[in-house]
Structures are given as C-alpha cells and as structure tokens.
Image (spheres, rainbow, N blue to C red):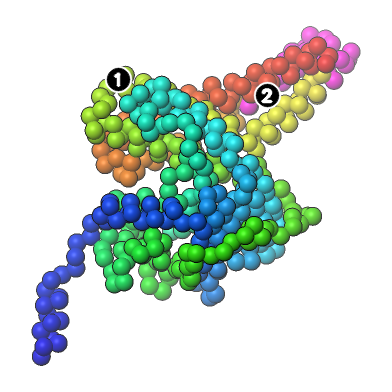
C-alpha cells in the first residue's frame, strides 16, 4: 500500500519541465575541461542496422595535439600545426592528406579581427590580436546524421565545443549527475546525455526504437600518460590518393562557419547590451566585416576548382598562342573565331563560378543560439547574402579573369 501510494504521488508530480542548464555549471565544466593536460576517450558508434559498433578512440594532449582513430577506416591527427589523414575503406584506394592549418587559420582570424576592431570599436576587447591556438572537439547534428570532429581554433576558447553549443538547449536532470537534452537544435528523435561530473557527452541516441543510431562513451581516462609516440601515424601508403586539397577546403568551410558565428554573436551582444545602435550605419559596418569573411572564403574553400581553372587557363592560352602563330589562321574570319573562343572562355569561367552561389547561400543559417531576436537574424541574413554575392565577383571571379587576361596577352605576344 505504501509503495502504491508513493507511485501515485510520483505520477502526480509530473515530469520536470526542461529548461536550459545553469550557465554557471557549464562555465565551470568548460573551465575545468579546458585545463585538462590530456585525455583518452573511447566511444562506440552504431548506425541504424549496424550489427557491430565502430570504435572511435580520441587522444588529446594540451594544447594542440589530437588523434582520432575511427575503427579500421581512418586516422586523423592534429600535430605541429598540420592535419594528417590516413583513410582506407573496403574496396577503395587508400587516401592520405597533409594540410597546414595553424598559419592559414591564424591569418584569417587576424584579418577578420582587424576588420571587426575598425568597424565596431565597442567589440574591440573581444577581437584582440594574439592569443593561443588549440584543439576543439565538437558533435554536430545534421538531419539524421551525427558528426564527431576535432578542429583547430585560433584563439582557443573551449576544448569541448558541446559545452557552448548546448548552453541554450532545454535539458532535464537525470540520475548520476547527468543532463539529458531532448531534440537539441531541433533534431527530432534525438537525445544527448551529458555528464556534469566530467563535461563529456556520455551518449547520443538518434532515431526511433528499432531503427536507432547511437554514440556512447565506453571508456574515459582524464589523466593518461601520452608521449609523442602516442600520436604517431602509420606510413603513408605508396598508392595513396592525395586528398590534401579537399581536406583543406573542408577545414576552411568549418572555419568560415565559426568566424561568421562569432561575428554575429559579438554584434548581437552589443545590440542587446545597448552598446550598439542597430541602424543603417551599423548595417554598413557589418556588411564590410562579412565581405572580409567571404572574400577569404571564396578562394580558400574552392582550392580544387581554382586549381582546375588555372590549369585550363594555361591549356587554353597555350592553344591560342599556337593558333595565333599559324599562318593558315591569319585571315580575318579565322582571327574572329579565335577572339570568339576567348570571349566564350571568359563567359564560361564566370558561369562556372556563379554555379557555386546558391549552394553557398544555402549554408548561411543563423540559429537562435546566436541571438533569439528573429528580426536581427533576418537583418543579418540579408546583409550576408549581399556580401556573398558581392565577394563572389570581387574576390573570386575578377582575380581569375585578371589572370586569364594576362595569359591571353602573353599568348598574343607569342610568349
């Protein structure tokens, strides 16, 4: 009878309402985990329908050494300012990559920080030069997929990125000093369990029962002994395909998203604190800042395409030079056709670049984690769209066309 009565009372109390966690708690966890000299974590990842899970082993040594081993398929290492990759999937050729990350990331930040200080003096304290680089670990949800990633940040502010990403997400307390976030960032049928003792995500469950995917912590060592040998890589296979350019593009895509998010969060804080009047002048200042972000992004995130365009320029200008020296093609009609070919190549370059505009615009989401002011987010989006369209021409198309015209002039001179 007593047990039944207690059960009725418990049912009558209902489920505690979910609300964002105490900011002081996440700040304390971030500070404590930021101070970790090293850790080793092992997760078990299981996709829906997968019989055996894939192990994900993560090694970290402060401030900028990281190694992630995804089962037997891939190893990613951040070490000495470079990203190194070894990957081998069944039935595919092995791939390898080596990408310099510290120098370009530092340069992009300094470029943007200079613009922010010039355009928004009230934000200058948040955009100081200098600082220390470091690794950041993130979990991102996209549709029905989960991605775990390590990235290189300058300056480094947080080691475990989810402690910032989950700060505004509703959560409920669970047994054993845990918080459970249901459908974070609008991800349907998803739950994230966070330990408030360690700051680590202990489990991510995605999907309905019977078709669920999971990412679950199997082991965690917060005081490992990690020497340089722990971050060694297997030799690069002789037949490995070089994927360095593709990885470089992806790294800059991630950095672009991080930089633009930091810009928006900084401006939103100023507006909320009434340290910045959100007027026409402020919009113009933001436009110039976003032009800096996307001018860098267009070239850096399209390294493969830019390289191919330059190769084709060389090929075309060589072809043109040969024909301009051919006596059989010196008559007016032949020369006209050659000039038409030059004009067509120029138009094709512009059209090829323009094909990347809509996909880029589709990536420019601005979430409520930046600001819950929907009107401000709408203004941000409109300003950014114009900046992206403008810099497509000024930072990508026009420099390539100038290179093209220079090569054509050399061909005309017989050089």
Residue 66 seen in render: yes
Which residue occupies the foreground of this view, 18 or 183? 18
Lateral position of residue 4 relative to residue 350, left or right = left
User: Where residue 371 appears, x then y in whole percent?
Assistant: 29, 40
Lateral position of residue 359 relative to residue 245, left or right = left
Question: Marks 1 and 2, how far apart in space?
Answer: 40 Å
User: Where residue 408 appears, x then y in whole percent?
Assistant: 74, 17
Residue 381 seen in render: no
Residue where numbered disc 2 is placed: 345
Above-or-below relation of 414 to 214: above
Q: Count neighbours of disc 2 (C-alpha within 10 A) and say few if under 14, some if 14 to 19, many if 20 or more.
A: some
Contact flag, marks 1 and 2 (Cβ < 8 Å): no
User: Where residue 414 appears, x then y in whole percent?
Assistant: 83, 14
Lateral position of residue 256 relative to residue 8, left or right = right
Above-or-below relation of 378 to 7: above
The residue most toward the right is: 327
Q: Which residues fall within the magenta stretch? A: 322-349
Of the two numbered discs 1 and 2 on the same chain, state the one appearing first in sequence. Answer: 1
* Residue 213 image label: none
Residue 311: which quarter of the image? top right
């Amino acid at each position: 009878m007593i047990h039944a009565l207690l059960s009725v009372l418990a049912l009558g109390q209902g489920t505690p309402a979910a609300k964002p966690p105490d900011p002081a708690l996440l700040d304390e966890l971030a500070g404590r985990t930021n101070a970790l000299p090293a850790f080793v974590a092992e997760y078990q990842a299981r996709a829906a329908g997968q019989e055996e899970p894939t192990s994900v082993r993560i090694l970290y040594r402060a401030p900028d050494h990281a190694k992630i081993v995804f089962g037997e398929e891939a190893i990613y290492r951040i070490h000495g300012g470079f990203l190194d990759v070894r990957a081998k999937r069944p039935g595919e050729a092995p791939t390898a990559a080596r990408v310099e990350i510290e120098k370009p990331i530092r340069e992009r930040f300094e470029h943007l920080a200079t613009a922010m200080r010039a355009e928004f003096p009230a934000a200058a304290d948040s955009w100081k030069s200098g600082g220390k680089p470091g690794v950041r670990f993130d979990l991102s949800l996209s549709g029905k997929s989960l991605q775990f990633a390590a990235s290189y940040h300058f300056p480094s502010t947080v080691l475990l990125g989810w402690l910032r990403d989950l700060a505004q997400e509703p959560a409920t307390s669970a047994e054993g000093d845990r918080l459970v976030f249901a459908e974070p960032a609008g991800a349907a049928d998803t739950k994230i369990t966070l330990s408030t003792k360690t700051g680590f995500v202990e489990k991510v469950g995605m999907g309905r029962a019977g078709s669920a995917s999971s990412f679950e912590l199997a082991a965690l060592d917060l005081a490992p002994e990690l020497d340089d040998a722990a971050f060694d890589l297997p030799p690069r296979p002789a037949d490995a395909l070089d994927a360095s350019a593709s990885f470089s593009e992806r790294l800059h895509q991630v950095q672009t998203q991080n930089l633009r998010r930091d810009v928006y969060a900084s401006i939103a804080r100023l507006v909320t604190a009434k340290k910045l009047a959100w007027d026409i002048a402020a919009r113009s200042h933001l436009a110039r800042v976003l032009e800096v972000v996307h001018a860098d992004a267009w070239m850096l995130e399209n390294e493969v395409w830019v390289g191919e365009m330059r190769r084709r320029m060389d090929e075309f200008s060589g072809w043109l030079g040969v024909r301009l020296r051919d006596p059989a093609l010196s008559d007016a009609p032949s020369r006209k056709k050659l000039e038409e070919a030059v004009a067509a190549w120029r138009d094709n370059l512009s059209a090829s670049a323009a094909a990347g505009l809509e996909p880029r615009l589709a990536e420019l989401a601005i979430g409520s984690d930046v600001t819950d002011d929907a009107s401000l987010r709408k203004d941000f989006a409109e300003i950014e769209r114009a900046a992206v369209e403008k810099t497509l021409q000024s930072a990508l198309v026009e420099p390539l066309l100038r290179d093209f015209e220079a090569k054509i002039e050399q061909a005309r001179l017989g050089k």
